[in-house]
Amino acid sequence: MKKLISTLFFIAVANFIFAQTTPTVQSTIGKKRKNKALPCLAITVDGDASMAIGTLKDLLKKEEVKVKSSSKKLEGNAVIFNKISNNLLNIYATATDIKGTRQTTMNVFIAGGIEANTFKTKTTEPAEIETLTLFLENDFVKAQKIAFDEQIKKEKEKALKKALKEKKKTEKEIDKLNQKIEELNKVIEINQPQ
């Protein structure tokens, strides 16, 4: 019974904890390679790093932007990302889980051309950075929210399934105890002097 109550309590707490905030993109300095500080756009979203990178990879794939990725990094060299620019770009992203939360911070870096190491900023390329900001705040956040909501839904279903299983188990135990009580009452009734 305690397990059932604790599982239901977990579901209630999960609803509160997983309440989502609207992420915003900020221009900042992030670390991409070998801890080298470079200008980038940072966004904090719900979900873990691999989910965020996977979401971004899927969105770029839909835009026909070829990228390579691992669980916490994404890289596209000499690609054309029409939503941002008709010129060749190098696009990189790194994601870091925020300890103690179910959120990740993702840094997105863009540089121009083939083998270009000049990373774009609001000052150098305001239109491209603004377009990338809008892409992240709209398309990426929407897709990430859907992925995270789906994960939460699955976790809630799993917790509910576990709670129902515990409830059935507890009900069976209660039935067994009630049956024993009835048997003991019969024994007491038979053994009472008349």
Image (cartoon, helix red, strand yellow):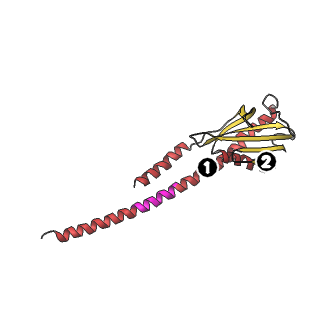
Identify the residue at the far left of this view.
194
22 w.r.t. 186: above or below: above
99 w.r.t. 67: above or below: above
Using residue 39 as the reference point, say whether residue 192 is left or right of it: left
Which is nearer the eye, 112 or 163?
A: 112
- Can residue 66 be seen at all in this image of the molecule? yes
- Give percent across and percent down for residue 34: 74, 36
- Give percent across and percent down for residue 158: 54, 56
Near mark 1 (Cα within 10 A), the count class, few <14, some 14-19 or many ≥20, is some
The residue shown at (74%, 48%) is: 69
Secondary structure under the numbered disc 1 in the rendered image: helix
Secondary structure under the numbered disc 2 in the rendered image: loop
- Give percent across and percent down for residue 122: 78, 30
The residue shown at (58%, 50%) is: 152
Q: Does the segment drawn in magenta span residue 164?
A: yes
| Of marks 2 and 1, the one in the foreground | 2
Compute the Cα span from label 2 to label 1: 25 Å
The residue shown at (61%, 39%) is: 98
State which region is magenta.
159-170
Q: Give whichever of discs 2 and 1 has the lower sequence position.
A: 2
Quadrant of the drawing holding the N terminus: bottom left
Quadrant of the drawing holding the C terminus: bottom left
Using residue 65 as the reference point, say whether residue 51 is left or right of it: left
- Which residue in the structure is indicated by mark 2? 67
- Which residue in the structure is indicated by mark 1? 149
